Amino acid sequence: MEAVIEKIDGVTVVELPYDKIDASCKPEFQNDVAVALSESGGKVVFDMRKVQFVDSVGIGAIVSCLKELGVSGGDLKLCHVAKPVRSLFELVRLHKLMDILNTKEEALRAFGE
Amino acid sequence: MKAIIIATGEQTGDDADLHCYPKAMLTLLDRPFLQHVVEFIVARGITRLDFVLSNMPEKVESWFGNGQRWGATIDYHLARNADQPYQLVKAIVSNADDDPVLLVHGDRLPLDAAIENHPNRGDDMPITYVWGEEAEPESGDSHGWTGWSWIAAAVVRDVPDDAGIADLESLCIRKSKSEGRLVEVRRPLSAQTYSQLLDSQKRALSDHASGLLVSGREVEPGIWISRNVGLPSSVELIPPVYLGAGSRIGQGSKLGGNVVIGEGSVMDRHCIARDSLIMPGIYVGESLELLDLVVDKNHVVNTRLGANCHVRENFLVGSMEVGPIHDWIAGAISRIAALGLLVGGTPIMMLTAGYLKLFRSGPVLFHKEYVRLPASPDRISWPVCQRWSFRSDADGQRRSGIISMLLLEFLPALFDIAKGDLHFVGVAPRTVEQLSQLPVDWRELVLRSKAGIVTEASVRFGHAPSDDELYCAEAFYAVNAGIRYDLKLLIGWMWRSAFGKDKVDEAMTVATPDTLAATLETNSDFGSLDRIRKYIKMVCHEMVRPPLDEDETYKVAVAVQETATNIMRHAYHGSPDGMIRFEADVDEQQLTVRITHWGEAFGSGNIPEPSFDKPQTGGYGLYIISQYIDDVSYCCDENGGKCVSLKKYLRGGQSSGSGNRKN
């Protein structure tokens, strides 16, 4: 499975193809998103509609992407986050570090404003 | 029609913040203020609600869920900055196809029929609701904003991303004057500050709670009593006063005016309360005077002074102080009794040891470390003792009958009781690590108590009390301890062990008909994580009755997977050849997953809270486990395995969630 990457109005939208982000698929995740981040121009949305499980390793991997983008002044937003995953993100206050939006359209609009 | 409810829990600069809830979740009469807001909106036919949250969003989301209970559909949006949430408001409004949207600040509620139900698309916007009583002459404006307006996309198009509430207020009022309408309504009820909340409860009660859904009934003007309230005739009630469901008021107390006693709270004898809110589930000790206070657990906010006080003394839960001579006499009786029992019980102990040696694998006697109580608050000076037991820590966590408890736990502990290190009755003995991990108020309370084999919690709540039950029991015991009370507890414990719910029929049993168990063994390969998750899902759905819902299952799965990942990384250092065993036990009270490995021991110390202020790529794992699981313990088994035990309490088939004390 490879991540589906599309560019919409200068924003790179990466639809993550995994049902989980944890230690078992972290290398795959890092490989897939590395390409997307390098070619993104700084504005990236992770569409997480297929991801049903994330643990602290997955959170660390996502935060790494945010930090990498932050170095060049870019930003990362998440959308379509499943409810239990979202609760986990809220527990570790991830929503204070990056925008977590309900839909892809909201994420694109947030970049547009 | 849609409403946007801003409930970001922004800090008001009020030092008295409880830091446990967003202010809108504080109680107004019988339910959270925000619930009154939602009910008011839904009653006007608006059932699509968009919450904008920021601080502690999980508190609001877990309370309201998907909104089905209120006949509404709720979407949640998360703002990075609690003070500047209006960029999200713009996005939501522009998504509403030019339909007017009701913008609501969830900590204010103008109970007024003038709030329109359904303005039309063509109506002039915005419609802003103001009240006139608190005009600010120096600003040249004769109105105050209720925080409620009907708006459309065009109204908020020009709102800058960093706009605060003052910017939005001036925009809404300016545009309403020029393009829309200003509508004057009654002054809103407010939970913006604690003093406003107390003022709101007074107004709501004085006004017969009109416009609010409130349980209970007004038995006399201004006196509200809910169901199942314990109210002796000697209590004086001065209106307005509201007594929540299941509350108990002690004899000779005087409550009012403007007092709300939350659901299940207990006021002991001869208390006086005025202009105060006692949150649900609080015990207030004898002869206390509460004036202008909001009380929640051991936090007290004085609204007159605007100060938050964390109460470390135990006077909130009792007023009895026992003198040193009384302590000495009680200690001496306990030691003499233990010595007598030891002499008489030695043959039985020898027989038990012989039986265990012959019929049980592993060591016969176990050392258990604990801190000798009472102790000073300084951790360095905590005296550590060792007590003997015929049971390992892991076995001790299982339910057992009275014979098993007496033979395996009680008899060996007589040595320690005779030495004076331990008592028959007291708070649960704890290790230095366990004591360090307690919240500061709880720890100080334990440090002033004595440790014992029989605990108040085991008598009141049985084998597996939740965090809150344990805290309440230990707080109650700390102020009631005495020879007579200890004797009463000892008898109560024996009665409960013999005839109570926790009784099991066989003396040394680990499996009963109402206990289910399942085991999984995997290697320490990250590829095994999928199997582990499936196993946990099976346990939560097929062994727990009724099954845990998806959210609770997810929490258990995350906690178990975090533990497994830590074992793979730190105990086996990434080698995939190690073995990990998962044993799940389910009974009517708890789900326990015991994870055993044979790698290097790691991490049973303090759980550091990660820094939430800056991006951090690691350090979340132990924090997540501590928040998603009710009890975590570490031990070694007789075969050299290192065990991590994760315990989730079940209440009527539903998990207790992450305990209330975990704020």
Image: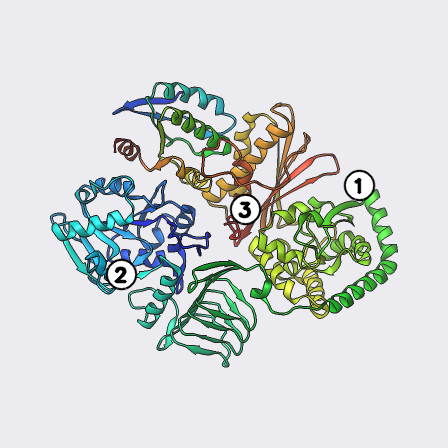
Q: Earlier in the sequence, mark 3 or mark 1?
A: 1
Callout 1: few (<14), some (14-19), or many (20+) C-alpha neighbours within 10 Å?
some
Amino acid, disc 2: Pro
Read off the chain for label 2. B
Mark 3 vs mark 2: in front: 2
Name the residue at 43% across, 53% down: B21
Residue B584's place in the image compared with B404, above or below, is: above
Amino acid, disc 1: Pro
Q: Are marks 2 and 1 on the same chain?
A: yes
Query: Helix or strand or loop: what does disc 1 sit on?
Result: loop
Read off the chain for label 1. B
Q: Closer to the camera, A74 or B515?
A: A74
Q: Are marks 3 and 1 in contact (CB under 8 Å)?
A: no
* Disc 3 target residue: B544
Query: Helix or strand or loop: what does disc 2 sit on?
Result: loop
* Disc 2 target residue: B110
Q: Where is residue B90 in the image (x, y as percent from the top left)?
A: 24, 41
Q: How far apart are marks 2 and 1 (CA)?
A: 69 Å
Q: How far apart are marks 3 and 2 (CA)?
A: 45 Å
Name the residue at 25% across, 40% down: B160
Q: Distance between the residues labelled 3 and 1?
A: 33 Å
Tell whether A17 sits left or right of B442: left
Mark 2 vs mark 1: in front: 2
Q: Earlier in the sequence, mark 3 or mark 2?
A: 2
Amino acid, disc 3: Val
Read off the chain for label 3. B
* Disc 1 target residue: B363
Q: Where is residue B538 in the image (x, y as percent from the top left)?
A: 53, 39
Query: Helix or strand or loop: what does disc 3 sit on?
Result: loop
Q: Closer to the camera, B164 or B398?
A: B164
